[in-house]
Image: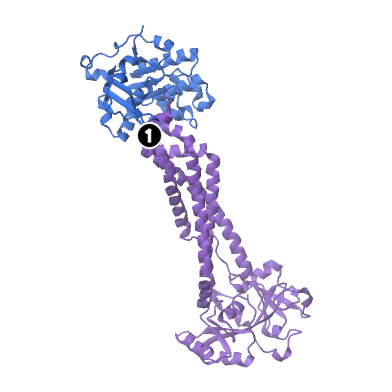
Amino acid sequence: MIATDLATPPPSALDPEDVVLRVEGLRKSFVTPDGERRLVVHVPSFSVPAGGEVALRGESGSGKTTFLNLIAGIVKADAGSIRIAGVELTALRESRRDRLRATTLGCVYQTFNLLQGYTCLENVLLAMAFGQGRDRDRAVALLERVGLSHRLHYKPRQLSIGQQQRVAVARALANRPKLVLADEPTGNLDAVNARSTLALLREACAEEGAALLLVSHDRDVLNAFPEVTDFASLNQPREAVLT
Amino acid sequence: MTIPHIVAKSLRQHLVSTLVSAVAIALAGGLLMAVWVMRQEANRTFTSVSGGFDAVLGTRSSKLQLVLNAIFHLEDSPGNISAEDVELVRRNPNVSLALPIAVGDNYRGYRLVGTTTQLFDGLDYAPGRTYRVLPPGRPFDPEAKEAVVGSFVARKLGLQVGDSFHPFHGLIYDERKQHAETFVVTGLLEPTGTPADRVIWIPLAGLQRMSGHDPRVATDVSAVLIRLKEGNPMAGFQMDMLFNKRGNKFTFAWPIGAILARLFDKVAWFDRILALVCYLVVIVATASILASIYNSMNERRREIAILRALGARRATIFGAVVVESAAIAAVGMLFGFLVYGAIVLVASGIIRAQTGVIIEPLAWHPVLGTAPAAIIALAAACGIFPALKAYRTDVASHLVPVS
């Protein structure tokens, strides 16, 4: 069921237009409280096909969240290349990275990261405001798609955990992203909600034409994907030499 | 539209601290505007009130005391001048009008001023505005015990035409010192917005010959209000030379506005201290905005990280915090106008009750625009500190738990 290295064909095997994300020689290190520099991410090569699905299996502390933050442009890489929809992310200054994140990427987090003072509809509309502009009709349609048409004006704390994650899914798709990054999207959900949310996420991404890059350590989640890449096989921090 | 939306949400989310800061701004801003406007308006109004006269002549004393006594009806009379001296002044070629006044009695705390009917003969106290008795009343008969009541006194004491009253001796009301004479109100003075509104005007002889007054000085007056002849720009200087420089019997208080202006100059240090206190209050109030936003930054950091993850730029976050600070000040200043209105209404009422001078409480003054703008700008500047903290928020560490 779990396949390592199979999800990432050699870069030359894919037409650039068929690849929404291509990572090469990506490295990120942090300075520990002891003052020691520790390499956390070293991914020589990785890619996600346009409109495709890639599931990464990774244990806690393996660096997979940092990897996603690097792809999202939230964390700046020490070295390497990240091309998203043909744009070299690492060459962009921060404000351009913010713009690229808003317009091209969608993110779903384990802790949902909804704005508590905003209603469901406002959470989606605000994401649009940073991206392609507010589109109330689309925001309503997205919330209807995730089954929350009757909760448009509810605030997150007035929703169940499962409903909150569905709002996060709608928000992630607000700007018609080319790639959705999902970091343990079912980590806080019970089994029933986890299955339905995962199915919803995959369906919604497929409908919107967005590629999905999901990382999880949950075997049940990973079993839902035909192919799963072991993040440990991608990330080789111990083999890298710190400079 | 994004920043105003974020700011509006944040203000609502932090409603209590927003309101507390806004109230502090309202009080500080209202106080600052009120002090500023009242100071300037009082200065302008008092230095322009002359009752229609150019100068006051009285016995040797301070010019300020003479003006306060004869024009503002506030101070004690410094002494009397004789009827012969009044005639001498009246015949002076530089004088077009010499109106004698006598004081020394009151009715329930309001001063009785004895004078002649010249006051009601078209004498203008301001351009195009003359002392007039409201119909159906009439001026007093100079030989009768009659009175014309100032509008403020009439309202306060409820006096109407046909009413009668017994004056009391002295300028301070003492019910044991009632005079035997009965005066009848023949008219009410049309409101003038000057100290004339807060006195009761009676015939000069009526006050001079009041029972209990010394008959040896029954023809003396307290002061002479003088209007100089037009066409001689040196008239005032010549009179000043005649009475103040060459003689030592009289004091010629001229020009009235300049004498009051000197009084304001003398107490200008107090104005400056008051203004300084107001500035400090404003600074403390705006600093409270800084403190409230700055202290809430820890709880806001996760929200800021989420906004950044959605694509908000650092500049957007920075701008939102600065605008929020300015918005709190703007909301505060809206209420500040209410505070300002309340303070000015009360203060102008007190000034009118004490002096008869009307200060227009709701008149536009440039500081009503500049003070709110300055306070909002100051608040925005204060917002820079928490905005920098927001600007530097590390997204990754505040967004998701590290796996």
Disc 1 chain ID: B
Foreground: B200 or A40? A40
Task: Return the x and y of residue A54 as percentages of the image width and height.
Answer: 33, 15
Foreground: B352 or A2? A2
Q: Is residue A146 above or below residue B267?
A: above
Looking at the image, which residue is at 35% across and 29% down? Answer: A36
- Determine which quarter of the picture holds residue B348: bottom right
Q: In the rendered view of the protein, which quadrant contains the N terminus of chain A?
A: top left
Q: Secondary structure at mark 1?
A: loop
Task: Return the x and y of residue B233 as percentages of the image width and height.
Answer: 44, 85
Judge whether residue B121 can be spotted in this image.
Answer: no
- Determine which quarter of the picture holds residue A227: top left
Q: Is residue B274 above or below residue B80?
A: above
- Determine which quarter of the picture holds residue A16: top left
Q: Is residue A10 left or right of residue A2?
A: left
Q: Dot 1 corresponds to which residue?
A: B312
Looking at the image, which residue is at 35% across and 18% down? Answer: A212
Chain letter for blue? Answer: A
Looking at the image, which residue is at 48% across and 38% down? Answer: B10
Q: Is residue A183 above or below residue B123?
A: above
Say which colour chain B has.
purple
